[in-house]
Amino acid sequence: MGNLSTKSITWLSVLAASSIANGSNLPRANNLDTFVEKQRAISLQNVLNNIGPDGSRVPGAGAGVIVASPSTVNPDYFYTWTRDAALTMKVIVDEFLLGDKQLEPYIENFIHSQAVIQTVTNPSGTFLPNGVGIGEPKYNVDLTRYNGAWGRPQRDGPALRAIALITYSNWLISNGQHQKAKTVVWPVISNDLSYVGHYWNSTGFDLWEEVQGSSFFATQNQLRALVEGGVLATHLGVQCTGCDQAAQVACFLNKSYWNGQHFIANINSDDGRTGKDANTVLGSISVFDLNARCDDASIQPCNSRSLSNFKTFVDSFRNSTLYPINEGTPQAEGIALGRYTEDVYFDGNPWYLITAGAAEYLYDAVAQWTAQGLLAIDETSLAFFQDIYPAARAKTYGPKGKCSEFPRILKAVRDYADSFVEVVKKYTPTDGSLAEQFNKTAPFNPTSATDLTWSYAAFVSMSERRAGKYPPSWVPAEGPIVVPQQCTPGSTKGVYSPATAAGAPDVNVTCTSNVRFEVNATTYYGENILVVGNTTDLGSWDFSNAWPLDASSYTDQRPVWAATIALTAGQTISYAYVRQEDCGQSPIREPATANRTLVVPPCDPDADPDATLIVTDDAWQGPTGNTGGC
Ligand SMILES: *[C@@H]1O[C@H](CO)[C@@H](O)[C@H](O)[C@H]1NC(C)=O
Ligand SMILES: *[C@@H]1O[C@H](CO)[C@@H](O)[C@H](O)[C@H]1NC(C)=O
Ligand SMILES: *[C@@H]1O[C@H](CO)[C@@H](O)[C@H](O)[C@H]1NC(C)=O
Ligand SMILES: *[C@@H]1O[C@H](CO)[C@@H](O)[C@H](O)[C@H]1NC(C)=O
Ligand SMILES: *[C@@H]1O[C@H](CO)[C@@H](O)[C@H](O)[C@H]1NC(C)=O
Ligand SMILES: *[C@@H]1O[C@H](CO)[C@@H](O)[C@H](O)[C@H]1NC(C)=O
Ligand SMILES: *[C@@H]1O[C@H](CO)[C@@H](O)[C@H](O)[C@H]1NC(C)=O
Ligand SMILES: *[C@@H]1O[C@H](CO)[C@@H](O)[C@H](O)[C@H]1NC(C)=O
């Protein structure tokens, strides 16, 4: 009965919010089950609406291309990101395995699109010989490269794509399609696992594309990819290049991110943040395995450190100065969650996928304790439990015994999960559309990209966990990864080959040589220098497709812009530099009389593929730009 008054307050505020948003006083169904079931179906359809070639919101997207959002301005998300696409495809594969057979063509198209995309030369580099191009974060929706400045490379995408395709391959094997898994899908997975084993120990940009360093989310997914990739390779009777790095990735994950209270989201970086970040909660959702032990090396939702981390992250948003939206919410209830408290992107608002993700995380943990029939609370996780079940103690609870507290504690965690879903429900418009964010300030309207694919995908997976439906296990039952005593740096040189059976072009036949373009060019802050030329890689004289150079070695003494590009060996090329100003002025090209030429060194299969065979020593010859003052 005490509950009733709380409920009616929520009810009134829902009414108030919906009348502001819609000018309508029609009440919405206030039952969480009804909302979740309805919103699950809406969300899945909206995911499909953002996938080419037939998605109703993404005309022009290629087959199997998962577009991040239909939004083309403020912000422009009309691209395909490898990370978002792979996370979405994992949800689609899981839905397919749960019985939604209409999804198979989406999976087939995705495999094809990714086989092609792996081979696309881009500003992160080429596919051959070293796979560096696979670390490119985003592409145009017609599968061509994106040339603008960006936080690149990003090393979580290949791992997540491997995870989605491994889940599908395991299903193929169990359904009489072993040969297809081996000849069509495995070559795509193999390139991604090669990349992970090759570069897990190199820095890259995090999932929010802001911090260069090592990201907990990336490392955690890299571990999963290498472990289950190794098992799949054994089943298929093929070699996994890179999977031998799994134990060292596990060591790095276990020993480098934990600070005694929470996981630091980004290390090997100098980002000046606390490190409390949704990164560390989303990572545990994507490695979730119902049957894994809570102390598994992958850091599962039921892991004690992870629970302490969850509490610390969530509490960082229980600050009504920062987040007026959370004002007055008691400690035992879910709140609106953003990426990290220092966030300023679109004012740093709550995200739907993170708030839903918190619920999914808690449903996952409850499912694991239920499956194990045990709940071991220790000093590390105690504070998490005491918030929602004040009588909790550091001990092991089991379901046996007359007045067992086990079901009561689990119910408290589940209610806590539901309270995060209530937040999502409260701020979801009546038509069920999910943007990227909702405003932390009244009237709490949706903001940033509309119809964000990842928001919808996150809602679907959360609703399945809430309904007790789980993805297949992946932690090997015969023996989880043993974390070595001593961590050492590592890398296994990858083997890269176009996945031609899945539709990749046979880029194998070309042999490339590395050319380093270096040009002295004094620039204003905000200007960029690019190289353009008469080959496809250099944009065929199309400035909008020129190759961006990097100013990371630029100094007052030597204002150098540079890039190393693998070019088809043996050819003579013609090239020039282009200056792009910061206020949208037309690009300035060096005069055509200044067209430069060089001969790309011939093919040498025995040469070190990393070696740079030729370095240009150029100086800018065109007019200088102006500050623009925009
Ligand atoms: C590489 O691995 C070592 C050993 O785990 C670790 O100390 C180091 O921080 C790692 N560096 C990067 C960039 O991953
Ligand atoms: C990770 O490290 C901690 C502290 O050294 C240890 O207690 C835990 O068992 C490790 N996890 C695994 C999976 O080895
Ligand atoms: C709460 O947020 C405000 C605004 O960002 C900040 O100034 C303040 O330090 C935060 N309080 C705590 C306890 O973190
Ligand atoms: C959030 O809402 C406030 C108050 O209505 C508004 O000033 C601000 O521009 C909004 N921010 C975004 C990113 O929509
Ligand atoms: C590509 O080259 C690799 C290494 O030489 C070879 O193993 C592979 O079979 C080739 N792939 C195709 C499709 O020709
Ligand atoms: C590019 O220009 C060079 C130098 O003029 C020329 O030798 C070469 O054939 C051209 N390549 C193409 C593909 O047109
Ligand atoms: C010089 O560059 C221009 C493009 O800006 C191109 O049209 C022209 O063909 C080039 N000349 C040579 C000899 O490559
Ligand atoms: C570029 O700058 C460096 C350092 O000042 C100088 O040594 C080099 O000669 C310059 N290159 C050209 C082509 O001017």
Image (cartoon, helix red, strand yellow):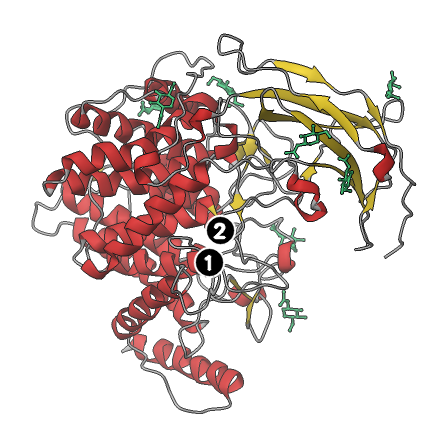
Q: Disc number at residue 294? A: none
The kind of residue on which mark 2 rests is: Thr
Give the residue pinned by disc 2: 80
Task: State the quadrant of the C terminus.
Answer: bottom right
- Residue 261 picture location, percent across and down: 46, 35
Q: Is residue 290 left or right of residue 252?
A: left
**Residue 149 higher or lower than 560, as above or below:** below
Q: Nearer the viewer, residue 463 or 311?
A: 463
The kind of residue on which mark 1 rests is: Ala
Q: Earlier in the sequence, mark 2 or mark 1?
A: 1
User: Which residue is drawn at the image coordinates 18% and 23% (left, top)?
Assistant: 237
Q: Is residue 547 left or right of residue 280?
A: right
Q: Residues within 10 Å of mark 1 (few under 14, many from 20)?
A: many
Q: Is residue 236 left or right of residue 251?
A: left
Q: Residues within 10 Å of mark 2 (few under 14, many from 20)?
A: many
Q: Nearer the viewer, mark 2 or mark 1?
A: 1
Q: Give SS at disc 2.
A: strand
Q: Nearer the viewer, residue 183 or 353?
A: 183
Residue 319 lies in quadrant: bottom right
Residue 209 lies in quadrant: top right
Kindly tell me whether residue 293 is visible in this rendering: no
Q: Disc number at residue 61? A: 1
- Residue 415 picture location, percent across and down: 29, 61
User: Which residue is drawn at the image coordinates 41% and 69% (left, top)?
Assistant: 56
Q: Nearer the viewer, residue 225 or 398?
A: 225
Proximity of marks 2 and 1: CB atoms separated by less than 8 Å: yes
Note whether ligand 5 is within 8 Å of mark 2. Answer: no
**Residue 559 higher or lower than 468, as above or below:** above
